[in-house]
Image (cartoon, helix red, strand yellow):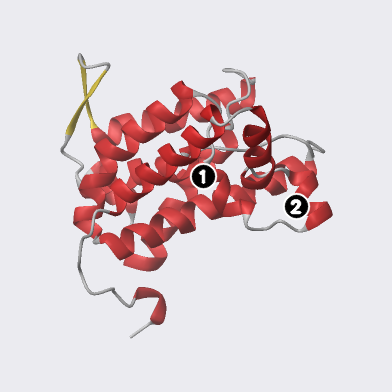
Amino acid sequence: MNIIRRPFKYQTFGAVYWLIGINVLVFALARFMGRDVYFYLTERLSMIPYIIIKDKWVWTFITYMFMHRNFQHILFNMLGLLIFGIHVERQMGSKEFLLYYFVTGTLAGVFSFAAYYLTQNYFVALMGASGALFAVELAYAVFFPDSIIYIWGILPLRAPVMVLGFTALELFFSFTGGRGNVAHLTHLAGFGFGWIYFLARFGMNPWRRLTRR
């Protein structure tokens, strides 16, 4: 069997809850232990191109996913991870889910580093789980294409429409510079690497699932 497609033994152990717990713990340490701790964690966990180039802190391609700017940032990311991640984890199994989460999130960080490097944005601090979260949302739509999501609790949308709509918005904002300093490229990269993961790991074309073809 192709090693890339070799499945894990199915089991679940609440990986989503562990990820949320670690994110909340890091956020609490950064916010409530004083400014020195905040800047210490920001420097060592965020993905900062200059530091990677200078000090080779390549682990930040992973740790940036556990650092968040403010309460709103972590709240929406963790709500999204809770709402969509639980179902995706149950479908994939916990080991597969963690592999998917970290592969897509890490590659989104590497892609963002390349983009920042090429545009000479060496001192930007990339942080947040949004890249991996976009991949998780894609997985949810692929596995549950008939699921209905209520945006703001009132607007019903099929999961594929929601995911493709959010992706279109990210494309629009990345070209227009809208919504301030949100790392749109990281979001798009997470979505893109999630798409590639499904093709390579599962031999599944997400487009056919999203469009029910």
Q: Label 1: few (<14), some or many (≥20) within 10 Å?
A: many
- Would you say 182 lies left or right of 14 here? right
Q: Nearer the viewer, residue 129 or 186?
A: 129
Q: Position of residue 75 (x, y in %)?
A: 39, 27
- Dot 2 lies on which element? helix
Frontmost residue, 206 versus 28: 28
Q: Residue furthest front?
A: 33
Q: Amino acid at mark 1?
A: Met
Mark 2 or mark 1, which has the lower sequence index? 2
Q: Position of residue 156 (x, y in %)?
A: 19, 21
Q: Secondary structure at mark 1?
A: helix
In-front residue for pair 85/30: 30
Q: Could you tell me which quadrant the N terminus lies in?
A: bottom left
Residue at figure coordinates x 56%, y 40% from the top left: 186
Dot 1 corresponds to which residue? 65
Percent across and percent down for residue 84 are 27, 40
Mark 2 burial class by Cα count in 10 Å: few <14, some 14-19, many 20+: some
Residue shown at 20% from the left, 66% from the top: 11
Q: Place residue 173 in its image quadrant.
A: top right
Q: Position of residue 69 (x, y in %)?
A: 56, 28
Q: Which residue is mark 2?
A: 52
Q: Amino acid at mark 2?
A: Ile
**In the image, residue 167 above or below residue 46:** above
Relative vertical location of residue 135 with respect to residue 198 in this rendering, above or below: above
Left or right: residue 110 compared with residue 86: right
